[in-house]
Image (tube, rainbow, N blue to C red):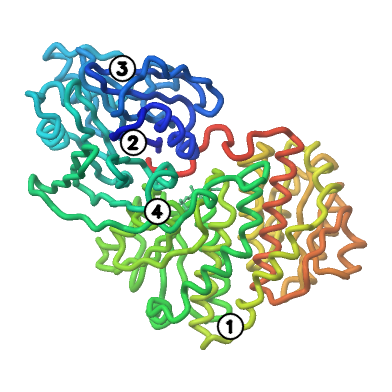
Amino acid sequence: MCGIVGYIGWRDAAPLIVEGLKRLEYRGYDSFGVATENGDIRVVKRNGRISDNHLDLSALSGTIGIGHTRWATHGVPNEQNAHPHTDCSGSIAVVHNGIIENYALLRRKLTEKGHHFRSETDTEVIAHLIEEYYTGDLLAAVTETVRHLEGSYAILALAKNDPRIVAARRSSPLVLGIGDGEMLCASDITPLLDHTERAVYLEDGDIAALTPARIDVYHDGMPVERQVDHITWSVDDAKKGGFPHYMLKEIYEQPQAFYNTIKGLEGDSRLAMVRVAPELTVAACGTSYHAALIFRYLAEDYGKKRVNVELASEFKYYAPPIRELVIAVSQSGETADTLAAIDQAKAHNCPALAITNILGSSITRKADWTLFMCAGPEISVAATKSFTAQLAVFMAMVNAMCDREFDDVLAHANCSIERVLSCTLGKAVALISEAQEMFYVGRGVFYPVALEGALKMKEISYIHAEGYAAGELKHGPFALLSPETPVVAICVPGRTYGVMLSNVKEMKARGAPIIGIGIEGDTEVEQVVDVFIPVPDDHQMVQVLTVSVVLQLLAYHTACALNRDIDKPRNLAKSVTVE
Ligand code: F6R
């Protein structure tokens, strides 16, 4: 977790770093800090969010600097634990994203040697270790330091009177930006977009020394060349574009995200590979896991392919009998548990195919092959367009399994998504925003759609929402139904339609207000439920998409009605790089 930014060049570093950190707040936002080098090291740190603070940068002169926005792991969020951290003399400053697993041992040894610690963080040991090995060459000191670190890190370091930033990475993302007479480094490319279109993605184990004129990368002590990539995302791609929140903007970008992803996969040979694999195992977390569950229903039903779906956070702690191909799905490409699932696949001699949104992310380095979703940057913590783009990848796989039977369905899906963006949700929002708890129910492929709807609602509105297979409610949760527990029921035509209607009537008989989602003109559903939300009558795969978008909008408007912090819900971060 956490976002880091570094700048070295000819401009004032601090304001530029602050702007970059604002773009990375989705990675963590409990505290932040900036350090600059200008004959000495100056540090300013604050508790809270960088976007809420008017930071006086006058103390931070200089054209070399590093900054950090934090998602606390070791030590509570406060000013002392905020990064950058410095050594005993205040001559070395470090920002870090990741977790140093052996920090307690290192801290004890360093304390015995006389080092004085000021924070509770794991990161501070890095600053003191660099101090320990520093003999006038920051690059050499960082190179020696990382040899002693266990765990994950993306590090930026500064030293007094050393006109360089030294960067190092292992299992945490770090990208360098090449400008004209200036260099940048950051956790992802969004802080670079205003300044350059040229980026270098560091490999695990790389250490880089940045000066205004050049970047030197080393691996195992040897200089190495790293490819310079062209950044295709625009600054506008990463900004709100007139929407009140990134989440709403990203919901509206879904027709495009779906279309682009389907187009991007046309003729991709990896789809054929998935098609011929006798069995698939998919591992993912959160929303990505729900997309994988939807894939299981579609692939088994239409493609007659056995698909096992595993929570990546569980997968590595037991030994499922995996065979054939493992597919690891991660929007960010940095989720620690999903990366560990690839290690598990390798331990079983299974090849791994990654599905991700982020070029150069860690998952692309670990997996044997990668399929990219073309969702563009997703800034809001709640996943929306990346979910739809994941479904696009999965639906393209199902289409390949079925000899492209669904070409037409996938070709028009974006238009159907477009139509539901303007759905009317006022009555449903009024009903839900009064509630403390609620249910989402569906059957068949709409069961994981219900799970995802509930996840969206709870994470941004803080209403306790449970997703259930509609038939399961009577096995216990019925005890919770009352006029105060609204139920969102997905009642679209198909094999489960009749039984869904019966389930809805059972819930209604127990007093629960029902918000029913059905196809336009379905008076049978409309008459049974309290609030009816219509979606276009379409193929089941398209209905998965349109219903999901309606549920995202329902969560969004409810959270707005409750005045929640939509793009940065409490206690969460966009990229979960810890176990
Ligand atoms: C929910 C959400 C999370 C992520 C999960 C996995 O809206 O965003 O549940 O889906 O943390 O993240 P990725 O897909 O980046 O591995």
Q: Earlier in the sequence, mark 4 or mark 1?
A: 4
- Residue 527 falls in image quadrant: bottom right
Amino acid marked by disc 3: Arg
Q: Nearer the viewer, residue 394 or 43?
A: 43
Label 4 to label 1: alpha-carbon separation: 28 Å
Q: Which mark is residue 333?
A: 4
Point out residue 493 in the picture as x, y percentages from the top left corner. Answer: 77, 73
Label 1 to label 3: alpha-carbon separation: 59 Å
- Residue at (25% x, 67% y) in the render: 349
In the image, is residue 280 above or below residue 123?
below
Q: Which mark is residue 97?
A: 2
Amino acid marked by disc 1: Asp
Point out residue 390 in the picture as x, y percentages from the top left corner. Answer: 52, 63
Mark 4: secondary structure: loop
Q: Which residue is mark 3?
A: 42
Any atom of ligand 1 within 8 Å of the CB at mark 4? Answer: yes
Pair 3/2: label in front: 3
Q: Is residue 579 visible?
A: no
Disc 2 crowd, CA 10 A, few/some/many (<14, 14-19, 20+): many
